[in-house]
Image: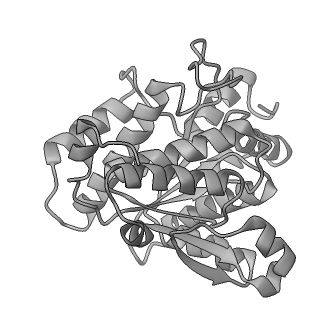
């Protein structure tokens, strides 16, 4: 284990928050951007004092997220027993995917692992156990899980009888797969965009002219080679934590909360983070309603 530097000594004193971030990512290693970003999210969460929960397997983006989380946690001085308290995963039961596939995928360790007997049960376990959902672009399964999280918010917003907490969804995607999917739905079924929850935020999807030397041939922005994008994600998570504390009536840093709100969401802010709905409506306005996006 490397010698702790001053930064990590300070980070190790962080008081862990009652705040869990779920990370949806693929089991494949084919999308290098997804694997890179999943690892970046994993490295970020312990520094923020936040728990992480994901699909639980040790392959692809799922495994990359867990390895990033464990690397930072260990550098902060956490033992494997402590890491297990903060890193969680939900995998399929062996009777669903079979022993051979289960062994091929492996399971993250150390981590608190639970098992599910269906996709809704597994995805629901990941989503329901979190305060914020981060979806790192992946295959069909990952996109379905991300849309399930968005649909969950859609139902909550239309429940007039019970005030339910917001669970924001943050998309980190370079190829705009989910954005393009919704745009196609809009073309075939107008007004689809109008039904979107406003709590889906989007990062990435653009080229980075200054590629980090250690990022190989990654030519698009990732959390590793784009400090601005990493900073925005970190500030978003901190803002949502403060918002949770505000909503449940706990003491919180009101000044910091309002500063973050202005920096992240004010139209005049150079660091504004756009929602998926804002991006799609802007494209629709540019191309004309009914003409696709």
Q: Please state the horizontal and vertical placement of residue 16, each as a whole percent of the image.
A: 27, 61
Q: Please state the horizontal and vertical placement of residue 52, each as a whole percent of the image.
A: 47, 61
Q: Residue furthest bottom?
A: 95
Is 95 rendered above or below residue 48?
below
In this view of the protein, can residue 81 be seen by the observer? Answer: yes
Q: How is the image coloured?
A: one colour
Left or right of 196 on screen, residue 131: left
Is 88 rendered above or below residue 115?
above
Q: Please state the horizontal and vertical placement of residue 246, each as a whole percent of the image.
A: 23, 59
Q: Nearer the viewer, residue 125 or 247?
A: 125
Q: Residue at x 67, y 42 (%)?
A: 34
Left or right of 190 on screen, residue 227: left
Q: Quadrant of the C terminus?
A: top right
**Across the whole image, how many numbered discs are drawn on residues?**
0
Q: Residue furthest top?
A: 209
Q: Residue at x 53, y 39 (%)?
A: 275
Q: Nearer the viewer, residue 67 or 200?
A: 67
Is 126 rendered above or below residue 75?
below
Residue 209, quarter of picture:
top right
Residue 234, quarter of picture:
top left
Q: Please state the horizontal and vertical placement of residue 265, each as a whole percent of the image.
A: 38, 34
In this view of the protein, can residue 199 be seen by the observer? Answer: no
Q: Residue at x 61, y 50 (%)?
A: 64
Left or right of 144 on screen, residue 263: left
């Amino acid at each position: 284990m490397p010698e702790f530097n001053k930064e990590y000594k300070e980070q190790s004193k962080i008081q862990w928050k009652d705040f869990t971030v779920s990370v949806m990512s693929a089991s494949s290693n084919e999308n290098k951007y997804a694997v890179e970003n999943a690892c970046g999210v994993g490295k970020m969460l312990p520094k923020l004092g936040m728990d992480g929960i994901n699909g639980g397997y040790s392959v692809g983006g799922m495994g990359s997220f867990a390895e990033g989380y464990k690397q930072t946690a260990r550098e902060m001085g956490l033992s494997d027993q402590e890491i297990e308290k903060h890193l969680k995963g939900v995998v399929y039961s062996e009777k669903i995917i079979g022993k051979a596939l289960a062994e091929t995928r492996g399971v993250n360790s150390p981590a608190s692992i639970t098992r599910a007997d269906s996709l809704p049960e597994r995805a629901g376990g990941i989503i329901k156990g979190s305060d914020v959902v981060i979806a790192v672009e992946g295959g069909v399964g990952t996109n379905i899980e991300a849309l399930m999280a968005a649909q969950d918010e859609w139902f909550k917003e239309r429940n007039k009888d019970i005030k339910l907490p917001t669970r924001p969804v943050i998309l980190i995607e370079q190829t705009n797969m989910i954005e393009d999917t919704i745009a196609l739905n809009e073309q075939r079924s107008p007004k689809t965009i109008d039904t979107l929850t406003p709590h889906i935020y989007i990062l990435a999807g653009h080229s980075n002219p200054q590629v980090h030397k250690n990022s190989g041939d990654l030519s698009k922005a990732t959390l590793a080679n784009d400090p601005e994008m990493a900073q925005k994600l970190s500030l978003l998570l901190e803002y949502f934590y403060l918002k949770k504390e505000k909503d449940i009536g706990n003491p919180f840093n009101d000044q910091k909360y309002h500063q973050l709100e202005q920096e992240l969401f004010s139209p005049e802010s150079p660091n504004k983070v756009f929602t998926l709905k804002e991006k799609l409506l802007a494209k629709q306005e540019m191309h004309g309603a009914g003409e696709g996006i």
